Amino acid sequence: MHEDQPATRFRELVVPHLQDALMFARGLTGNRDDAEDVVQEACLRAYAATGRGTVRHPRAWLLAIVRNTAFTWMAKNRPKAVLALGDDAEIDRLAETADAASTDTAILTPEAELIRKAEAAAVQRAVDALPALLREVLVLREFNELSYREIADLLSLPIGTVMSRLSRARLMLAISIAEAHRD
Amino acid sequence: MTDARLPPEADLLLLNALVDGELDAPAAAALERRVADEPEMGKAHEAIVATRAALARLERPEVGRRLLDRIEAAAGVSGPTSPVRQPRRQADWRALAASVALAFVVAGSGGYWLGANSPGETASDLVASTHRRSLLAANPVDIASSDRHTVKPWLDNRIGLSPPAPDLAAKGFALVGGRVDVIRGNAVPTLVYRHNEHLITVVAVPAAAGTSGPQSKQANGYNMVSWTGSGFSYWAVSDLERAELDRFVEDYRTATGVAASPES
């Protein structure tokens, strides 16, 4: 049994990863204020869980709690902005869309030059407009800098699914950023 | 600039893996040759790199003093006080099958995680339902192992939480394995023990400090015992006889240091 005070363990296990938690929550909720509320509530859950020394991977553990918290927090406070992260039908629709896109000879690769010229605000809008399923994988990779394996473990997904969602997320981003800049 | 068609998805996955440093050296070298030789691959690679660069320019939210104060003030008190209403979500219960006889569900923190304070179903009902579903599942565990040093890390890696999984084989309760249940939208760790031909399912949820129980009850026709200690709140459900379930709970509590122990 661990003799540490919960507050001490909280500072050791949770506080070092708050930045990661906030970035992930920002990606899941789409705005800073909601992200802070989610992180605060996730921290309460984490605090309640730090009574025991069972946490092996504090960052992954906290991110998992943030994700669970974001679900429940959004369902309660932002019921219209449904976080349909577990919706199989949506995954299928996305897959079909992507398959159609990849066989459609009319799809052109977005111009890197247009993407490079894009302003940060436009890029942020494009990220926020991504389907939640794709956005969370993108955020975990680009902002939290998790490896494919870490993302797969966190989301309980096959690594191939992580790869295809990340690829689609970047493609959708590239297309919408390039188009926004062209306008 | 010339237009270039988008490469097939399989190639896009490889290009993404390349920029993410997820390819081994031979695969990366082969792909880099294609990027150099094939205009479509080159353009797609350039677009992915540009997209990553655009994301890198975005501002990262900083954890300000104000947020840190908020969090520490909230956590500094006695932990969560208001229960969170959870949306209803279904766990991925597997196909029907198998007769299982004893389930032991460790659940937690009173109502916090399981939303027991919300109207309608009580936490005990939810736990009993979880148990009933597990009896219908093809396999009561996702990770089958009698070694707690296998089961606990598996749960830790899945959801970052694992309850104590004492070795109670000498008491007649062998560890079968573990799984993750979803109760009111929360992933909760579950352990499964076996007694004779009966299975025991154990779910654990974090609790604030303190101990309480054990408290015996019935839910949905199952015997149930709940208690709090060692950082978790626990619910035990089973169709074992009351005396047998109580004995199991007592052994579990003793092994996890919750009950006064005559042994080490």
Image (tube, rainbow, N blue to C red):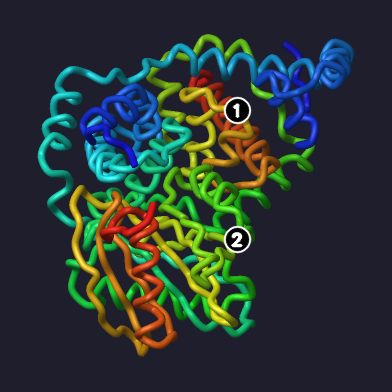
The disc label shown at residue A183, or none = none
Q: Are marks 2 and 1 on the same chain?
A: no
Asked if residue B176 is positioned above or below residue B219 in the image, the reply reads: above
Q: Quadrant of the N terminus of chain B?
A: top right
The answer, for residue B39, to whether it is visible in the render is no
**Element type at marker 1?**
loop
Q: CA distance from mark 2 to mark 1?
A: 24 Å
Q: Chain of mark 1?
A: A
Q: Residue at x 58, y 25 (%)?
A: A174
Say if mark 2 contacts mark 1, CB within 8 Å: no
Q: Is A47 left, or right, of B4 in this rendering?
A: left
The three-letter code of the residue at mark 2 reads Asp
In the image, B253 versus B178, the foreground residue is B253
Residue that carries the numbered disc 2 in the rendered image = B142
Residue that carries the numbered disc 1 in the rendered image = A147
The answer, for residue B224, to whether it is visible in the render is yes
Q: Residue at x 48, y 80 (%)?
A: B102
Q: Name the front one of labels 2 and 1.
A: 2
Asked if residue A12 is positioned above or below residue B261 in the image, the reply reads: above
Query: At which x and y percent is residue B179?
Result: 53, 60
The three-letter code of the residue at mark 1 reads Ser
Query: At which x and y percent is residue A100?
Result: 72, 47
Q: Is A65 left, or right, of B48 in this rendering?
A: left
Q: Residue at x 65, y 18 (%)?
A: B47
Q: Quadrant of residue B229?
A: bottom left
Q: Residue at x 66, y 46 (%)?
A: A158
Query: At which x and y percent is residue B141?
Result: 58, 65
**Element type at marker 2?**
loop
Q: Is B8 left, or right, of B52 in this rendering?
A: right
Q: Chain of mark 2?
A: B
